[in-house]
Amino acid sequence: MLTKLYFDILRDIIYKNTGITFDDKKKYFVENRVKEHMEELGITSLKDYIYKLKTDKNILKEFISKITVNETYFYREYYHLRALAKLVQTENHSFPVKVLSIPCSTGEEPYSIAIVLNEVLEDLRKFEVVGVDIDTNAIKKAKEGVYGSRSVSKLPSKYLEKYFDEIGPGRWRIKDFLKRRVRFYEGNILDRLFMKSLGKFQYVFCKNLLIYFDDKARTQAINNLYDVITDGGYLFLGHAESVSRASSLFEPVKIEDTIVYRKVTEEEEDEW
């Protein structure tokens, strides 16, 4: 049973390394993940466990992997993919079209984006997709590109056949020609230098992450996203998220019955 003291220490470790805040209601969740991790490591003392978190980067990475949520599947929130397809077809672009997915979890979103872009542009050379996540294990799985039946259950059968190889009962692997258009990196959205090192993107998907941040971390994340989006580029957020209260750097735009956020350029800010 986590005492308040140890829970506060663990919350501080999580916040400093991810920007994610856990309120008192999440104590049971954290407690279960800690118990599981301690058993795997053969550690019986919470004091010793916390010492390991503070001194061993690999153990810290394992802990971060356990407390970050990776629930996802192909074509999740399909309305965003429809909006992306519409924008790619109507905006004036230089090629390749570049899209960032952060956090990308185990890769279902960036690969979904790659499928949509290939269908719309009909040329693999015309797009690049980058996936970023803080979870080491998630990035490893994304690079492998192997998924179970549940992950691909929402995909139209024609796309399953076109973009996947069936490698066993209920096991599907992304075909190499598509996999080559998606790159994955382990990284933190709050790390400004890392974010800038990724380059510029016309479209950024950052869904269901900002809701876990406090105001300070949320503002920092939004500023970092602004830096990597091209002038006039678009930010896609989860349905429960908005940048309106945290920043004036983006303006909401309705595309295909959903709201996305267009980057406001310095010239446009001056006009205001």
Image (cartoon, rainbow, N blue to C red):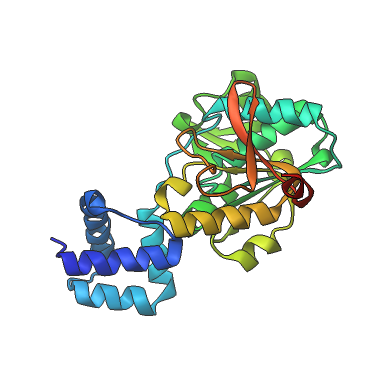
Side of 210 relative to 131 (left or right): left
Residue 213 seen in this snapshot? yes
- In the image, residue 191 lies at what x, y percent? 57, 65
**Quarter of the image where one finds residue 65:** bottom left
Q: Is residue 132 left or right of residue 97?
A: left
Q: Position of residue 199 (x, y in %)?
A: 73, 57
Quarter assignment of residue 205 = top right
Picture coordinates of residue 194, whole percent (x, y): 63, 65
Q: Quadrant of the N terminus?
A: bottom left
Return the residue nearer the eye: 35 or 231: 231
Using the image, determine if residue 43 lies above or below residue 26: below
Answer left or right for 7 relative to 243.
left
Q: Residue at x 24, y 69 (%)?
A: 42
Seen from the viewer's position, the closer of residues 13 and 234 is 234
Q: Which quadrant would residue 84 be assigned to in this image? A: top right
Is residue 169 visible to us here? no
Can you say whether 92 is above or below 5 in the image? Answer: above
Residue at 80% from the left image edge and 38% from the top image edge: 124
Q: Nearer the viewer, residue 42 or 104?
A: 104
Is 250 above or below relative to 40?
above
Task: Tell me the residue at 36%/77% (across/down).
Answer: 54
Q: Which quadrant holds the C terminus?
A: top right
The spot of residue 129 in percent (x, y) is: 69, 45
Tell me how many marks there are.
0
270 or 170: nearer the viewer? 270
